[in-house]
Amino acid sequence: MSPLNKKRLDSTCLQIKTPLSKDSKIIVGYFPGYYSQYTQYTQYASSSSESYYDYISPTFGPDDVSNKNIPPTSVHVFLNKTVAYRDTNNIPVKIFLAIVLSGNININSNPSFANGTSSDRAAFITNVVNFVRNYKLDGVDLEYPNRFNCGKWLNDKNFVPLVDELSAALKEINKELSITVGPIPITGLNSDSVSFVNVMATQLNVINSLTTPTNNTGPSITLNQTSTIMSNWSKIIKPAKLNLGVDFYGIVELTAPVDLGSLDNNQIIPRNLTKLPLDTSYSSDPSIYLFYDKCSFTLDMSIQLYPWYFMRLETGPLINTCTAGNGWARKFDSDTSTTYLYKVNSDSLVVGSYEYYYVSYEDPQSIQYKLKLIADSSYGGIAILDLYADSNDKEMLSVITSAFPAFNNNITDPSNNSSSGLSTVEIILIIVLVFASL
């Protein structure tokens, strides 16, 4: 018998019953601006996604843009439909264009970022402003190239001036600027230049272990680590402008052995995940799910990513939100306020030993602690990376909006003093633009 069957399993998954916050909060969502292999498996069309978010950032495909063409000039059908639907139906959601420098690009081939004078950046800023105006967008989200603290960008000193100059240009046409950053605060950043800052406190331990291997299995990030990151950022940016970044992905690794009392002694097995640990009809090609190492800019064959909606498929590891099935077991770790799944790997080659699939992920139980952190610390709100990773019935979003009610779901008469007193949530959809290398 596997030692898996000898362990006690969690049977409860506490849910938020009443809203946590009476302050105004922001819900930011990142969304692809193109039809992809991911969006076909969810129902996040314009009509459904905009009922949950304050700010939405669509993502363009890598072939939409190059270092010589900023912003892209192709016809963006999805973006046009999203904006048109918002405008036609008077949906109170803001749509931002996210500009991303991602991957192992030669930043010096991009004059608007690499050169150090305002005149060098002027053409880039003009193009961005014109793009925002032409597509009737509400602002721009500028994504810090070194947001994972391991990037190869050597021109960090030019990021802050770019933020200041782009912010000033956008303000002239009554548009906003936000930035998406990593765990390390950016020296010299002017709080007045940004409407809000999305702090992507995700996958920290996975990234760190790839940079400095520890061979230990554990949560991708703990609540204490998240709290420290946000606290450090609040020293240079007002808490009300900080949005806590989360993702709805499970990070799949192989580990041996599994000690459910403590994960400190678990060792990651350095082998390829050539078999899909989750039984889905999504794709037979496991390379689709491989983890992209944000430090070495390579695919890591020992780690895979699975979106939350995979967990909730009929053949997935969860029978319901907080009960595992199909050979999987689930545990909530109260020490780190994180959830994980595990399952015996049937391909283990050593008789009498057990290798396990280990999945660290965000779920409706673990995210409650982050929502409480946001409310207790008076942070601005939450930023959700990759909206399409949620289940088709928006299971994770329902938990978030139960704590931070979206204002188009909680419309009250401002003249009625007997209203609930709950402030509305500002919804933002961020459409991401990827700067691809040539």
Image (tube, helix red, strand yellow):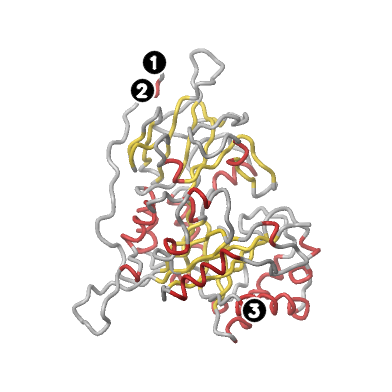
Residue named by callout 3: 129
- Residue 416 position within the rendered picture, expressed as x and y whole percent measured from the top left: 21, 82
> Of label 1 and label 3, which has the lower sequence position?
1
Q: Are the residues at dot 1 and dot 2 in contact (C-beta closer than 8 Å)?
A: yes
Residue named by callout 1: 1
- Residue 243 position within the rendered picture, expressed as x and y whole percent measured from the top left: 47, 65
- Residue 98 position within the rendered picture, expressed as x and y whole percent measured from the top left: 59, 66
The quadrant of the image that shows the N terminus is: top left
Q: Nearer the viewer, residue 228 or 130?
A: 130
| Label 1 SS | loop
Amino acid type of the residue that numbered disc 1 sits on in the rendered structure: Met
Examine the image and state in which quarter residue 283 appears.
top right
| Label 3 SS | helix
Q: Is 290 drawn above or below residue 188 in the view shown?
A: above
Say if residue 311 shows up in the picture. yes
Residue named by callout 2: 5
Q: Is 174 drawn above or below residue 390 in the view shown?
A: below
Say if residue 380 shows up in the picture. no
Residue at x 78%, y 77% (from the top left corner)? 120
Residue at x 48%, y 43% (from the top left corner)? 250
